[in-house]
Image (spheres, rainbow, N blue to C red):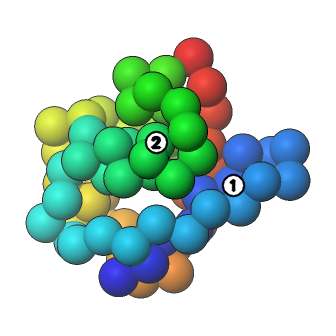
Amino acid sequence: MEVVCNDRVGKKVVVKCLPEDTVGDFKKLLAAQIGTLPEKIVLKKGYQTFKDFITLEDYEIHDGTNLELYYS
């Protein structure tokens, strides 16, 4: 599946992943594409901040979902 991350500064990144990947795994894939450390990435949707140990499937993140990308 493909998930779109938008950092609100104009950068949109499409990440290919699996529904059973954890958010931590997803951050590693994203970090490899944007050239930053996974520990510095914060993913949100609305007011919900995603925790690293929960799977994308459990957060109901599907193909084509847009996530907000922040840096800590």
Q: Which residue is tagged 2?
A: 31
Amino acid type assigned to the residue bearing label 1 in the image: Asn
Query: Camera-side residue: 19 or 14?
Result: 14
Q: Residue furthest top?
A: 72
- Circle 2: element type: helix
- CA distance for labels 2 and 1: 13 Å
Local crowd size for mark 1, using a 10 Å CA cut-off: few (<14), some (14–19), many (≥20): some
In the rendered image, which quarter contains the N terminus? bottom left
Amino acid type assigned to the residue bearing label 2 in the image: Ala
- Residue at (46, 42) in percent of width and height: 31
Q: Position of residue 50 (x, y in %)?
A: 37, 39
Q: Position of residue 49 (x, y in %)?
A: 45, 35
16 vs 50: above or below: below
Q: Residue furthest right?
A: 10
Q: Which residue is tagged 1?
A: 6
- Circle 1: element type: strand
Task: Tell me, yes or no, if residue 34 can be seen here.
Answer: yes
- Residue 66: mark: none
60 vs 49: above or below: below
- Residue at (22, 72) in percent of width and height: 18
First of labels 2, 1 by sequence position: 1
- Residue at (58, 46) in percent of width and height: 34
In-image side of 71 versus 21 (left or right): right
